Amino acid sequence: MGGAGTAEVFRAARGFDSSPLYRHLLAVVADEPALVELAARTRPGQQPTFALFGAVHQLLLDGVTDPLAAYYPSVVGARARPVDADTGRAFTRFCLAHADRIAAILATRLVQTNHVQRSLVTRLGLALLRSATAAPVCVVEVGCSAGLNLRADRYAFSVGDSTVGAGEPASGGRWSPRGGDGTVGAGGPASGGRRTPRGGSRVHIRVDVSDGRLLPDLDRLPVVADVVGVDLDPPDLTDPEDRAWLRALVWPENAHQATLLAEAMRVVADDPPRVLRGDVADIGAEVAASLPAGLPRLVVHTATRIHVPVDRRPAFDAGVAAFGADGPMLHLALEDDQLIAPSGRAGYGLTATDAAGSRRIAVADGHLAWLEPLPELGTPIVLGAPE
């Protein structure tokens, strides 16, 4: 992406409502050619807004001393200065002083924001599948980063006035093909690993839902037969530098998200799901073939397609579609931005695709701080056999 295109990305960027600092800095970068040139070094297909802000944030969190840190609550806590006339100058000076280090981060890192709140999409998908079938299911996330949201059945959720999730995998049994009949045995969870004792998950996600009556029963989930994620460059949760990058991608004001991320990283590091390195456009069919044939599969991606170069999006879509070749598929995508929810809030559209077609079932905040179900969420899921 050239300089003019990069500047326009910063000018047109939306969705930074929960970060007054970043919202202010968007215009600062767009109007400063040196910053635009630096941001343009972001890897192809990646959003330069998230990448540049993440790179600067990582350096500050790593302990680089600079007056800019005074504007970051994640660094100085409640003493952080509000945005003022000096903020842009401080940011510009910092970027120019550390341009080489920032450029090195931009050249080697992908935008792999792992907002744990988005695991509600996976949990919602599991509940929708359970409403349509008693069969065990496979769970796939495309652009899964470290795979934190693949453990949605390990987390507790407060959704509107209700809390679901006891801290144990809700799949409740180990799936065994038993000659292909899909019998559920009496063993532990299909995904295996250590359970959190009853009484609550270490990860508790709260989402403001305007009308919970439209939601399926989020405590009634299917047995999970297999779980797999696909990511271009999966972070390694045992690597301190990878964990630091995931932390840097959380916006400075969002302390609650940072706490959720830290807890989820600990939970998933104890029992990591299968995460495969590669582009779904290239390996989707191969990964799909590794799943138990005939079982329903839930395929999820949230704010992933936006980072795919435009000319690669048809191949991305084909790679996702490949998961429906050997079993009925429910595909949930939180990707349609700049939508207006019934309340008037701007958000992202959550689209469900099954054998009956595609429909928008909710509008949500990009980080899943809130979700507004639409009437189409009540449309029964149709799982047709592949032709």
Image: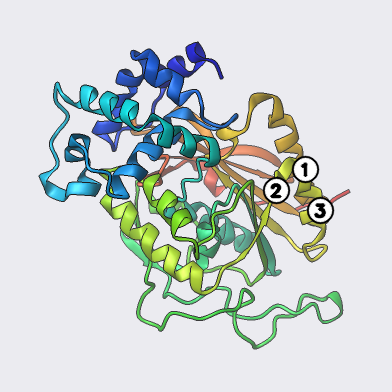
Q: Position of residue 74 (x, y in %)?
A: 24, 48
Q: Position of residue 239 (x, y in %)?
A: 49, 61
Q: Position of residue 87 (x, y in %)?
A: 19, 26
Please, what secondary structure does the residue beneath circle 1 have? helix
- The residue lying toward the viewer, choosing from 65 and 379, is 65
Q: Are marks 1 and 2 in contact (CB under 8 Å)?
A: yes
Q: Quadrant of residue 200?
A: bottom left
In this rendering, would 171 be left or right of 33? Answer: right
Q: Which residue is mark 3?
A: 286
Q: Are marks 3 and 2 in contact (CB under 8 Å)?
A: no
> What's the distance in space between the residues labelled 3 and 2, CA to CA?
11 Å
Colouring rule applied to residues: rainbow
> What's the distance in space between the residues labelled 1 and 2, CA to CA?
7 Å
Tell me what residue is drawn at x 39 percent, y 58 percent. 261
Furthest-bottom residue in this view: 186
Location of residue 245 with respect to 101 vertically, above or below? below
Q: Which residue is mark 2?
A: 278
Q: Which residue is mark 1?
A: 282
Please, what secondary structure does the residue beneath circle 2 have? loop
Which label lies toward us, 3 or 2?
Answer: 2
